[in-house]
Image: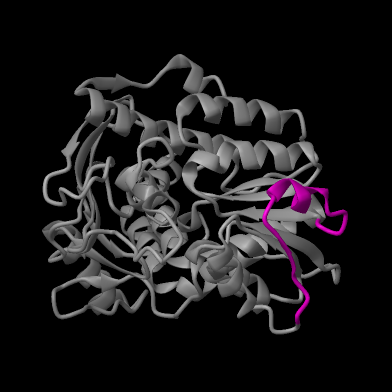
Amino acid sequence: MKRRNFVKQAGVVSAGLLLHNRMMASYGSFFSDKKINVGVIGCGDRGKGVISVLQDIGDKFSVKAVCDILDIRIQQTKELDKLNQFTYYRDYKKLLDDKRVEAVIIATPLGLHFTHAADALKAGKHVYLEKTMTYNSQQALELVEQAKQRSKQVLQIGHQYRYTPLYFRVKEMIEKNYVGKVTQIDCRWDRNWNWRRPVPDGYTDRQINWRMYKDVSGGLPAELLSHQIDFINWAFDTHPDEIYATGGIDYYKDGRETFDNIQAVLRYNRDGMIGNFGATCANEREGYIFKIKGTKGTIDLLPNDGVFYPEKQTRKELETVDGVSGATKIEWNKEGGIPIMKEKSKDGTWYALQEFYKVIIEGGDPVSNVTTGAKTAFCVDMINQSSFNQTIEKWQSAFSAIG
């Protein structure tokens, strides 16, 4: 029985196409020819990127209106308006008053997420809100309550790892105990540049480089590490019980307020796990690291690629299955790992918007919803509070009460 169970587990890494198709059956919808009219609030790089994806799946969505307070962003967005069909607004409330718009994409600075999402819900719109969901924990709690009062409207949060085929498969590997008992998670997202963008004439640094200012930005934890934190919450159906973080403006003494160097330790008591999440703007050697370490092996992830490295005993068992029984064919790389993905996939936003369409048409909650988004927002806020105040932050009972 043990051997047969192991053979089944071994098949997890060789059945990618089946898993991918099942994921699309869950997240995609192909039973309606209705197009949903969309408005986009916030036309920076992320907003324009989402517009491009909406256009790529144009059989489901039609972008009717866009909004940004900066003229430069409006002008840049016009390059995407090939059919000259966008209506341009500088006041987001006027976009929300536009009766054609059924759903809105919110890709504004983090400090505006709560206000824009709450007003969009009040206006009767479906909402796709970019991560991190809110600037702080109190706003997250309030948005959960507002969303509950408007249960017929969709509020989806843009944590795309929940929709990417690679990460979907990794979640299944964890659920099927392929990795064994996980005790350590190591994550980094590093770069060696100042994270600043050039400020055009006529604009202020705060307008262009809002990520540098504490009153509107969650810094590196919100902009980068929230992706990995959210995936761990999802894959293990968990949340950290306590967080200790430290950081500082350790290299770029340029007037920024958010840290350019951050390290957080998240303790998951129920799961017996420690998560190490860090980012720096002063070294890019390791770049992106996401390692999930279990008693049977390690999952080593990049945003669009992943490898499973078995421990010695697990490797011996896998080689027996592969070489003797012929039950499954395992492909090993030069470092002794098993590639997790064979087929190429689209960007996670493409899959996420497929589900956004599905739940608008068919009802139900998206996988990345207001409750899961709130839990990750709590984590980000706890990291910032801990690093700013040099405290150990505890998970609050109010956080668990949201469901």
Specify the farthest residue to the top. Answer: 397
* 333 vs 382, nearest the viewer: 382
Specify the farthest residue to the front. Answer: 202
Q: Which quadrant is the C terminus positioned in?
A: top right
Residue 313, compared with residue 62, is above or below; it is above
Q: Is residue 79 left or right of residue 400?
A: right
Q: Is residue 338 left or right of residue 252?
A: right
Q: Is residue 164 visible?
A: no
Q: Percent from the top left, x then y, of residue 107?
A: 56, 54
Q: Is residue 173 visible?
A: yes
* 90 vs 21, nearest the viewer: 90
Q: Percent from the top left, x then y, of residue 242?
A: 29, 24
Q: How many marks?
A: 0
At horizontal 81% and vertical 57% (from top left) the residue drawn is 101
Q: Does the stretch in magenta take in 95?
A: yes
Residue 349, compared with residue 76, is above or below; it is above
Q: Percent from the top left, x then y, of residue 304?
A: 37, 70
Residue 145, by quadrant, is top right
* 344 vs 395, nearest the viewer: 395
Colour pattern of the rendering? one colour
Residue 379, compared with residue 99, is above or below; it is above
At horizontal 69% and vertical 29% (from top left) the residue drawn is 146
Residue 377, by quadrant, is top left
Q: Percent from the top left, x then y, of residue 238?
A: 41, 34
Residue bounds of the magenta highlight: 84-101
At horizontal 31% and vertical 27% (from top left) the residue drawn is 385
Q: Does the stretch in magenta take in 284?
A: no
Q: Is residue 357 left or right of residue 254?
A: right
